[in-house]
Image: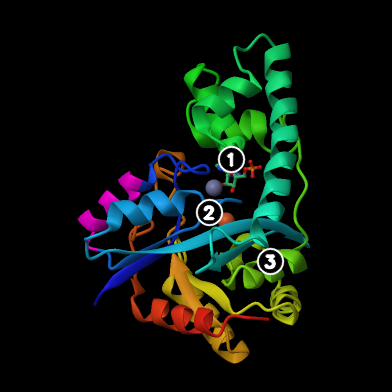
């Protein structure tokens, strides 16, 4: 069976592997396709696509947008046009807001005497800087043992260096992915710790704005959990997608294409998405 991974982060956001390194890992793993789904940017796609040219690996342009509904909810978009005129100003807004937050976080650290500055963070990590980057720097400074430890002590909500940021409304996130020619998909549904009734409300609300798929296979989800999500997706007529949420060293327990071990996403999933993207307009 040909396998794929439709949830992959690169150095364009908070992954630690460059797009080229991700492509190399995917080829080593024998994957037929990957989707580059960085937070709030599609900038990693061009490099990944170029690196995969002439190989058997297909690279799908994607994105992951953070929103709020009950709590934090992530929406994935597949086959978006990375150059879309609709998408660009919206992502620019998100990144500008991130930047304001990042300035404040860096200033809090600097006020404690830590050698951290907003400029250095951007110089080193690029346009989309997030809390995992700060966590990494805190580890390097000897203040934490791991990214997780740095989150727990310093950058998780309520901790001393945490500053919140704004989120694109969930309705707008789904819509903008469609306007960019993409297929909107609800990411990792169990991450939100919702009761079934709330999950259904979330799904139905997103479907009102054009949601077309749900991530049913994901790192750490058991067979039973995936079977439950697959049944739910079928009931709603949503495409069942899957991916690892690979972040390189920022989530060291997750392996590309394999998740925490048992992940297996068949190539057929991609064909459904491709067909849906072809029908794509609102
Ligand atoms: P940001 O969007 O910059 O606020 O950072 C959020 C990102 O940090 C999420 O998308 C996760 O990838 C990561 N993250 C959030 N909480 C944790 C945690 N407790 N441990 C490790 N990574 C986390
Ligand atoms: Zn991330
Ligand atoms: Fe996510
Ligand atoms: Fe992700």
Q: Which residue is mark 3?
A: 176
Q: Position of residue 34 (x, y in %)?
A: 37, 62
Q: Is residue 47 in the magenta section?
A: no
Q: Do the residues bearing badges 1 and 3 touch, measured as CB atoms within 8 Å?
A: no
Which part of the image, by quadrant, shows the C terminus? Answer: bottom right
Which part of the image, by quadrant, shows the N terminus? Answer: bottom left
Q: Position of residue 157 (x, y in %)?
A: 72, 39
Q: Nearer the viewer, mark 1 or mark 2?
A: 2
Q: Do the residues bearing badges 2 and 3 touch, measured as CB atoms within 8 Å?
A: no
Magenta segment range? 20-30
> What is the basis of the colouring in this image?
rainbow
Q: Which residue is mark 1?
A: 128
The tag earlier along the polypeptide, 1 or 3, is 1
Cα–Cα span, label 2 and label 3: 13 Å
Quarter residue 64 falls in: bottom right
Q: Is residue 24 above or below residue 131?
A: below
Question: Which residue is rendered at x = 22% and y = 65% of the image?
Answer: 56
Q: Position of residue 54 (x, y in %)?
A: 22, 60
Q: Is residue 128 above or below residue 52?
A: above
């Amino acid at each position: 069976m040909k396998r794929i991974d439709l949830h992959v982060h690169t150095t364009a956001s908070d992954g630690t592997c460059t797009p080229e390194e991700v492509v190399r890992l995917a080829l080593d793993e024998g994957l037929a396709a990957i989707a580059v789904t960085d937070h709030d940017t599609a900038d990693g796609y061009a490099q990944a696509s170029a690196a995969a040219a002439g190989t058997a690996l297909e690279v799908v342009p994607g994105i992951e947008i953070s929103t709020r509904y009950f709590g934090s909810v992530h929406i994935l978009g597949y086959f978006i046009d990375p150059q879309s005129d609709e998408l660009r100003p919206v992502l620019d807004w998100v990144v500008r807001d991130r930047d304001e937050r990042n300035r404040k976080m860096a200033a809090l650290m600097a006020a404690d005497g830590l050698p951290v500055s907003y400029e250095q963070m951007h110089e080193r990590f690029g346009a989309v800087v997030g809390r995992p980057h700060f966590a990494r720097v805190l580890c390097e400074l000897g203040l934490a043992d791991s990214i997780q430890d740095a989150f727990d002590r310093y950058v998780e909500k309520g901790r001393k260096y945490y500053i919140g940021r704004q989120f694109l409304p969930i309705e707008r996130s789904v819509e903008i992915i469609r306007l960019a020619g993409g297929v909107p998909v609800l990411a990792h549904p169990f991450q939100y710790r919702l009761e079934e009734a709330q999950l259904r409300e979330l799904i139905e609300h997103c479907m009102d704005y054009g949601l077309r798929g749900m991530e049913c296979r994901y790192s750490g989800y058991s067979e039973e959990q995936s079977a439950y999500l697959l049944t739910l997706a079928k009931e709603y007529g949503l495409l069942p997608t899957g991916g690892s949420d690979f972040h390189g060293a920022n989530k060291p327990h997750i392996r590309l294409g394999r998740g925490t071990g048992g992940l297996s996403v068949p190539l057929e999933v991609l064909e459904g998405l491709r067909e849906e993207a072809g029908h794509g307009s609102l």
